[in-house]
Image: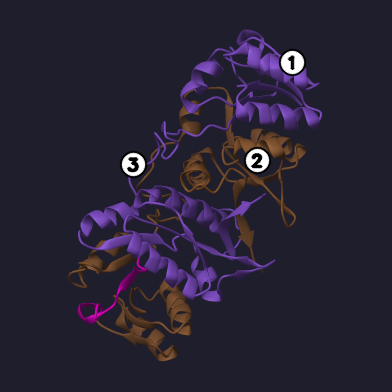
Chain colours: A purple, B brown
Amino acid sequence: MNITLIGAGSMGAGFVKQLTAAGHQVRVTSRDLAKAEALAVAHAGATAVAPADALGDSLVVIVATSYADAVPALKALGSLEGRIVIDITNPLTADYMGLTLGHATSAAEEIAKALPGAQVVKAFNTVLAQVLAEGPAFPNGQTVPVFYAGDDERAKQTVRALAESIGFQPVDAGGLKNARYLEPVAGLNIYFAYGAGQGTQIAPTWIRRG
Amino acid sequence: MNITLIGAGSMGAGFVKQLTAAGHQVRVTSRDLAKAEALAVAHAGATAVAPADALGDSLVVIVATSYADAVPALKALGSLEGRIVIDITNPLTADYMGLTLGHATSAAEEIAKALPGAQVVKAFNTVLAQVLAEGPAFPNGQTVPVFYAGDDERAKQTVRALAESIGFQPVDAGGLKNARYLEPVAGLNIYFAYGAGQGTQIAPTWIRRG
């Protein structure tokens, strides 16, 4: 496949490595052309090009810039009519700990606001009822996680112990604000179960290496 | 642990089963007390109680109603000062395919709006650069997924083929609007990697049973 890649940072470098290894032709462009050239020198199948020359006959454009730079960098390529743009960006805040757009509150935060004095902890919202009913043991020794997020450390420890007592794997997901992440995780879970028809014995989890 | 549970629907029933099996004392209340009573009859360790009597000396209150009912149902218990409230709700739309609050747009949708004519597909945003660099093979035969969301079927098939060509597991995540889910999934991934200090060889995935 002929692919244009915008960005020669860490995601860009990863794409050049993996795409050229798979035999794709990659045209790399970057605000810093020297970085694109360094990637091209290191990987046969990759060439460094200026933004105006970057489109060529590429079917696919991968935008591996920051979200703030994505639209200007894409527009610098010229008309994208009929091209496929793969948006890999996340609209992160400067400290990486939040999103700059998309969501502004969560059910958990609204509930906490309505109940001053109560220690609200978001938890179990990514566990489908059918999974809760049959329990946390999944194939290959996997245990369904319970993500919990809250602002009171003692309350969180209690919820952790509670999840553990019924066999689930408790996972600390940070402050109550992170319900803004957990609720969309559940949204995707419900989409997979019902919207995509995968059924209800599914659960989101995280995998690790090394 | 002494626990108050609001709601006798499918999540409520699952909690009664799992919590009583683990030896917890559960006070179940519900708008429909007959359903709470049916659960109490079926599970030693559970008792059905009216909302005004539901709090008792419970340390923890689990709210297993819909999000719309959560605050009124919690307030019906009386003062929650010092109690731990576990919010398991998701603010779902009537068709379960969206959230009613929290997020209103996504980077992918903004990019698509700015580039009419281009087929924008959200993908790879949940893959950390360090995971991309080292490749998709995780322990125990696990393969890192690439979730892709878009509104053009042909563009999605191309992105699917691209992800597959470099060894990742492509997962259809629906229309471009579901970038509103995928970007927060990435937000949580980045929180785990950097905020919680778990390191960068991690990835979100879904597990299945049965």
**The magenta stretch spans residue A201:** no
Q: Measured from the top left, where is residue A18 in percent x and y?
A: 74, 32
Q: Measured from the top left, where is residue A75 in percent x and y?
A: 53, 15
> The disc numbered 3 marks a residue on which chain?
A
Q: Which residue is mark 1?
A: A47
Which quadrant of the figure contains the C terminus of chain B?
bottom right
Q: Is residue A55 visible?
A: no
> The disc numbered 1 marks a residue on which chain?
A
Residue contact between numbered discs 2 and 3, judged by CB atoms under 8 Å? no
Q: Secondary structure at mark 3?
A: loop
Of residues B103 and A182, which is closer to you in this image? A182
A175 horizontally vs B203: left or right: left
Q: Is disc 3 surrounded by few (<14), some (14 to 19) or many (20+) residues within 10 Å?
A: few
Q: Amino acid at mark 2?
A: Val
Which quadrant of the figure contains the N terminus of chain B?
bottom left
Quick one: label 1 or label 3, which is nearer the N terminus? 1
Residue at left 48%, top 84%?
A: B21
Residue at left 55%, top 24%?
A: A65
Q: Amino acid at mark 3?
A: Ala
Of residues B80 and B104, which is closer to you in this image? B80
Residues at marks 2 and 3, CA–CA distance in whole angstroms: 29 Å
Q: Secondary structure at mark 2?
A: helix
Q: Are marks 1 and 2 on the same chain?
A: no
Of residues B92 and B142, which is closer to you in this image? B142
Q: Which residue is mark 3?
A: A104
Residues at marks 1 and 3, CA–CA distance in whole angstroms: 41 Å
Q: Which residue is mark 2?
A: B131
A24 horizontally vs A209: left or right: right
- How many marks are shown on the rendered structure? 3
Q: Is disc 1 surrounded by few (<14), some (14 to 19) or many (20+) residues within 10 Å?
A: many
> The disc numbered 2 marks a residue on which chain?
B
Give above or below for B53 relative to A3. below
